[in-house]
Image (cartoon, grey):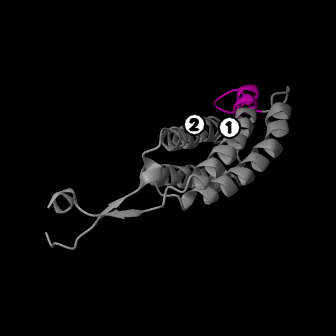
Amino acid sequence: MEENEVVIEHPNRAKASSKATKAVVLLLLLVSVALMLIVTVGGWDALAGAKPVQVAYILVYLIMAFYVSRWNRGVLPVAAALAILLLIFAAVAVPGWIERDDTGFAQPAIDAGVLGFVTALIIPVQVLLIAFAMRAFNQAWNVEVERAPAHAAAA
């Protein structure tokens, strides 16, 4: 190693609040994926044009979870923006699933009432994801501090 090399530290990542917020954002992204998977798989036959959108959302949320796990702060506003859109989609879809639970409609693989309930659960999860993603963004995970190597400081 050269004498003038420095060590890069990220002090905000070591804080307990940052670690907890990161864990909550990861959990909320993965819970969102699980809920979307239930709706997608359970209602596959009843989903008209929403299949590509749901599959894309699942993939994007998984990719964002990967980047959040690596302390990437840049995906947090994107996660919040996509959560707003998913919240709107879910709010619009809940009445459709509940109406489909009536007699005369063909039932999807999972009962339409259950899918309506699962879709309704997506709404509060997205509200929490928006709040925690913005909290995480404000924690400045990207701040770097240059320090002299430990062996150089002792010399």
Local crowd at mark 2 within 10 Å, few (<14), some, or many (≥20)? Answer: some
The quarter of the rendered structure image containing the N terminus is bottom left
**Mark 1 highlights which residue?**
125
Sequence-earlier tag: 2 or 1: 2
Q: What's the residue at 42%, 45% (across, down)? A: 14
Residue at (74, 30) in percent of width and height: 112
Residue 147 in the image: x percent, y percent?
31, 62
**152 w.r.t. 61: above or below:** below
Quarter containing the C terminus: bottom left
Is 120 situated left or right of 68 in this image?
A: right
| Residue 76: % across, % down | 59, 55
Residue type at tag 2: Val
Reply above or below: 136 against 148: above
Bounds of the magenta span? 106-118
Q: Residue at 68% of width from left, 47% of height from top?
A: 130
Looking at the picture, tell me which residue is in the foreground, 121 or 148: 148
- Residue 43 shows up from this direction: yes
Q: Position of residue 8 (x, y in %)?
A: 33, 62
Q: Nearer the viewer, residue 153 or 92?
A: 153
Q: Say how many tags the image has.
A: 2
Residue tagged 2: 31
Q: CA distance from mark 2 to mark 1?
A: 8 Å
Seen from the viewer's position, the closer of residues 152 and 122 is: 152
Q: Secondary structure at mark 1?
A: helix
Write down the quadrant of residue 6 in the picture.
Answer: bottom left
Q: Is residue 115 magenta?
A: yes
Q: Label 1 near label 2: C-beta < 8 Å?
A: yes
> Identity of the amino acid at label 1?
Val
Quarter of the figure with residue 126: top right
Q: As displayed, is residue 69 above or below residue 17?
A: below
Q: Decide: few, some or many residues near mark 1? Use Cα within 10 Å; few <14, some 14-19, many ≥20.
A: some
